[in-house]
Image: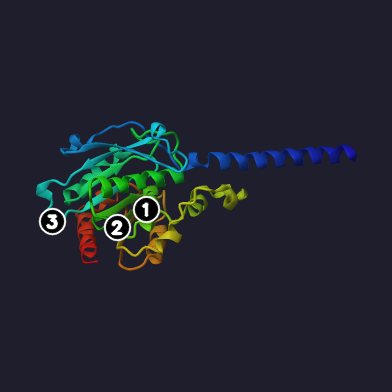
Amino acid sequence: MQFWVKILVALGTLLAVLYLSACLFLFVRQNRFIFFPSREISTIPSDLQMDYQEVWLPVISEENQSASTTEKVHGWWIPAAAENRSPMKSEWVLLFLHGNADNISENLKHSNRFHQLGFSVFMVDYRGYGLSQGKFPTESTVYEDVETAWNYLVNQRGIPPEKIVIYGHSLGGAIAIDLASRKPNAAGAIIEASFTSMRDMVDYQYPHFNIFPIDWILTHRFDSISKVKDLKMPILFTHGTADETVPTSMSQELFDAANEPKKLFIVPTADHNNIARVSGEKYFETIREFMKLVDYN
């Protein structure tokens, strides 16, 4: 009898150690389940006949105040083409924030759509992506990076905050909502195929992880649903009905939680990455209508 008790105790101890080890692994490595950085620059703006300027910006963080060791983020400033400005009738700037598994080069075709509408576009890679310096990103570092990008537009280029529209796709949408919550004078925000919170995404994409105490483990919150309700600027949400990465219902939840003025553009059959391509001219029309709302506001 004592033999079996010892066996059960040993097995229980082993299972407890394995469980706690798994919890520790998820805690330490959680950003590896969220960020999938790409370093390769496959396209540059001139490939799409867009004039541009290379931009390198030092990121001063609370942890790193030394100028000699400051990491830099890389971006492209793409000024509006004179022939494209007339439809917008104003010099708007789009701060373009990409998702978790690509970099600015893989988003050039989409940013070109906004450029064709008359926007000047500033695209920036978070640290760990593209040519930006730094190691693996975290929630706090991407917030610092986009704060740096915002300050570049306002302080170095002299662009009024009320002329800057913040765009974010997927994880970039959560980053955009956070930035918008800290920049109430921004003109507006466009949130494409994004989610309510990282906690909700764990439930959706990794339901088997719920055997672990996720609420204790998860420190990368990206809690958009809590932040969006405090935004006062115009906001446009877009999503495709065939999105298997982020459910369409999450954009609906964000829209429902947001204040007026707001718009929701749902595209039948579009997936996570092809909303503009599937909707075609309707996408351009939606952006134009939204910018009228921004201009009026």
Residue 82 visible in the picture: yes
**Residue at the far bottom in the pictured view:** 260
Residue assigned mark 2: 186
Label 3: which secondary element:
loop
Secondary structure under the numbered disc 1 in the rendered image: helix
Pointer 2 local density, CA inside 10 Å: few below 14, some 14–19, many at least 20 = many
Measure the alpha-carbon separation of dots 1 and 2. Answer: 9 Å
The tag earlier along the polypeptide, 2 or 3, is 3
Q: Between tags 2 and 3, which lies in front?
A: 2
Query: Mark number for residue 147?
Result: none
Query: Which of the image's four quarters has the C terminus?
Result: bottom left
Q: Could you tell whether 291 is left or right of 259 in the image?
A: left
Whichever of callouts 1 and 2 sits on the residue coming sooner in the sequence is 1
Question: In the image, what residue type sits under mark 1?
Answer: Leu
Q: Position of residue 180 (x, y in %)?
A: 35, 56
Write down the quadrant of residue 251 in the picture.
bottom left
Circles 2, 3 touching at the beta carbon (< 8 Å): no
Bin the neighbour count of mark 3 within 10 Å (Cα to Cα): few under 14, some 14-19, many 20 and up: few
Say which residue label 3 marks.
Answer: 87
> Where is residue 126 drawn, in percent x and y?
37, 40
The residue pinned by badge 1 equals 179
